[in-house]
Amino acid sequence: MATIDLGAANFESTLNNNDIVLVDFWASWCGPCRMFAPVYEKAAAAHPDVVFGKVDTEAERTLAAAAQITSIPTLMAFKGGRLVFSQPGALPAAGLEKVIAAVREFDVESALADQQRSA
C-alpha cells in the first residue's frame, strides 16, 4: 500500500477507522525528512495491513501544533485510535521495522486497564 496524505479533514477518521496507523510528520525543506521518505515508502509497500500516513507540517500547521510536533521528521504510531509511539528523527529501515513489530504486539486494552488501575 502506498502512503496517504493526512490533513485536518481526514486525520482523526483515519486513526479511528484503522487498526494500526503510522504517521510521518515532515516538510519538503527538511533534509532528514527527505532521507527518511524512501525508507517509509518501502515499509508501506511491505506492510499493506498498516496505514502509512504523511502530514506536511507546512501545509498542516494547525494539525502539527495539535500533535505537539517540535522536531521533524517525527514518527507517530497509533493502534486502535490511540497514540502508542512517538519519536522525532529519521529511523533506519531496521529501526522502522522494529517499531512496526512492537506496535503490532502492543496490547492497547491491557495498557489502558493498567493505566486505569493505577489512577
Image (cartoon, helix red, strand yellow):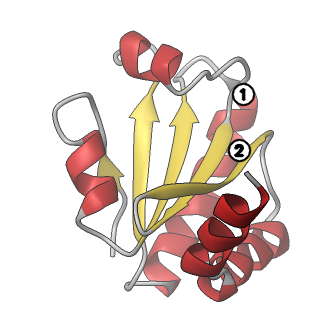
Residue 31 image label:
1
Q: Secondary structure under badge 1?
A: helix
- Which residue matches tag 2? 35
Q: Are marks 1 and 2 in contact (CB under 8 Å)?
A: yes
Q: Nearer the viewer, residue 76 or 119?
A: 119
In the depicted structure, whether residue 44 falls above or below residue 81? below
Assign the N terminus to one quadrant of the image: bottom left
**Left-right relation of 80 to 118:** left
**Kind of residue sitting beneath label 1:** Gly
> What element does badge 2 sit on?
helix
Q: Alpha-carbon distance for marks 1 and 2?
A: 6 Å
Percent position of residue 54, x then y? 43, 44
Q: Residue at x 67, y 80 (%)?
A: 106
Expressed as whole percent of the image width and height from the top left, the position of residue 67 reads 53, 27
Please state the horizontal and vertical placement of residue 112, each as a whole percent of the image: 61, 66
Residue 69 drawn above or below residue 98: above
**In the figure, 21 relative to 37: above or below?**
below
In screen coordinates, is 105 left or right of 9?
right
Kind of residue at badge 2:
Met
Q: Position of residue 95 (x, y in %)?
A: 83, 68
Residue visible at 52% across and 23% down in the picture: 28
Hey, which quadrant is residue 63 in on the image? top left
70 displayed left or right of 80: right
Of residue 104 and residue 98, the one placed in the foreground of this image is: 104
Q: Residue at x 38, y 75 (%)?
A: 19
User: Please, is residue 107 above or below residue 60 in the view?
Assistant: below
Name the quadrant containing residue 90.
top right
Q: Residue 94 has which mark?
A: none
Q: Quadrant of residue 5?
A: top left
Q: Residues within 10 Å of mark 1 (few under 14, many from 20)?
A: few
Q: Residues within 10 Å of mark 2 (few under 14, many from 20)?
A: some
Question: What residue appears at the point 42 percent right and 35 percent down from the top-left corner?
Answer: 55
